[in-house]
Structures are given as C-alpha cells and as structure tokens.
Image: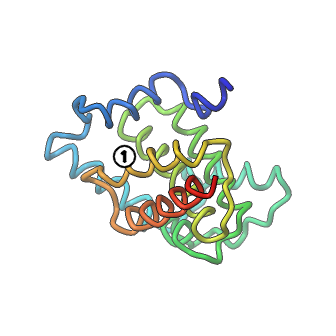
Amino acid sequence: MEKESTFGLRLDQMASLFSMSVGEPDPSDEEGEREQMAALLQEQLASALVKRSLLFDTLVMMLDQQGHDTRFLAGTSLGEVLLSPQSDVALLQGIKNCGKKLSERLDSQAESALATTLYFAALASALVHHDRKITQHSYEKLDESFALLIEKRWMDQGLAELFSRARRICEARRNQK
C-alpha cells in the first residue's frame, strides 16, 4: 500500500507534483523559467540520443542489464521513441525506470521535473500505444498526474496530446470497474 501511495517517488517529488494541483506556486511560473523549461524539454525530446549523455548512458545500461539490443537507439530522438507506436514496451519500461532514477538523483529542480515528465510520458506511451499499464499507479492517480502535466505551460504539444489520450484511456478503465 505504501508503494501505491508514493508511486516510488520521494516525498519532495510528490510534494512538488501535488503543489501543482493545489494552486501553490509552480517553480516554473516566471516567464523566463517557463521558457527555460520548455527549451530544456524540447532539447531532450528533439535531440538524438547520443552516447555519453546521462540519459542515453543510463537508459542503455538499464536495458543492457535486461538483455535488450540497444544499438537502434543511437540517432533516435527521445520524442520519436515516446510518441511512436512501434516503440517496444521494454524500451518504454526502461525510459520509465530511467526517468524515475534520474528524478531521484538530480539536484536541479528543472532537470528533476524533466525526468518526472519523461517517466510519465513512458507510462502514457505504453498505455496509448500498447494498451499496457507498466506501473502500479491506479488509473485514477495516473489520470490526475497526466492532467497536471498537461496544464504545464512549458509542456511539449506532442506530449500534451499523448497525456490527453492516456487520460481518456484511464477514464474508460475507471468506468469499467
């Protein structure tokens, strides 16, 4: 039950996520900070995954440990991977795990928010493109998290659409019960 309530996130990460929904100031509310967050997210989504980047190296290490072929990742952008219906569920699971680990280890609030966004983007992608829930989060909690991310003014439009599609699936699953 404890895992269900924190979803594996640290207390400060959950507080940051919940503060978004209760009207507390968003750390990226300043116009310059919103632009910086948008640029940081866009850079991560559009840039090809290259060796010797923290994200690529962490992702490759995690997938290699699971026995997956990672050669195809070089030259592919993270945005392409997250938005593609052809992305393997194991790869999305790896991105999810990588985003979670990075969000726990990064000191920068902006980079931690980015890692958390990638975590939820991997969850949304698996749900939308493969009809798979790769987390213990309830559909209700996923729906709430996706809604919070959609509202971020710095959110990439492609991810916002992915989160929106995932929300519709979550709502349908909740109504089936």
Q: Is residue 142 or residue 13 the one in the foreground?
A: 142
Residue in view at x 66 percent, y 55 percent: 133
Classify 10 Å Cα crowding around label 1: few (below 14), some (14-19), many (20 and above): some
Residue 148: x, y in percent?
36, 46
102 up-or-down from 11: above or below: below
Q: Is residue 26 left or right of residue 15?
A: left
Residue 13: x, y in percent?
46, 30
Residue matched to label 1: 148
Residue 61: x, y in percent?
73, 50
Residue in view at x 57 percent, y 73 percent: 75
The amino acid beneath tag 1 is Leu
Residue 114: x, y in percent?
42, 46
Q: Is residue 29 left or right of residue 3?
A: left
Q: Is residue 120 left or right of residue 36?
A: right
Q: Secondary structure at mark 1?
A: helix
The single residue placed furthest to the right in the displayed view is: 67
Quarter the N terminus occupies = top right
Residue in view at x 54 percent, y 56 percent: 170
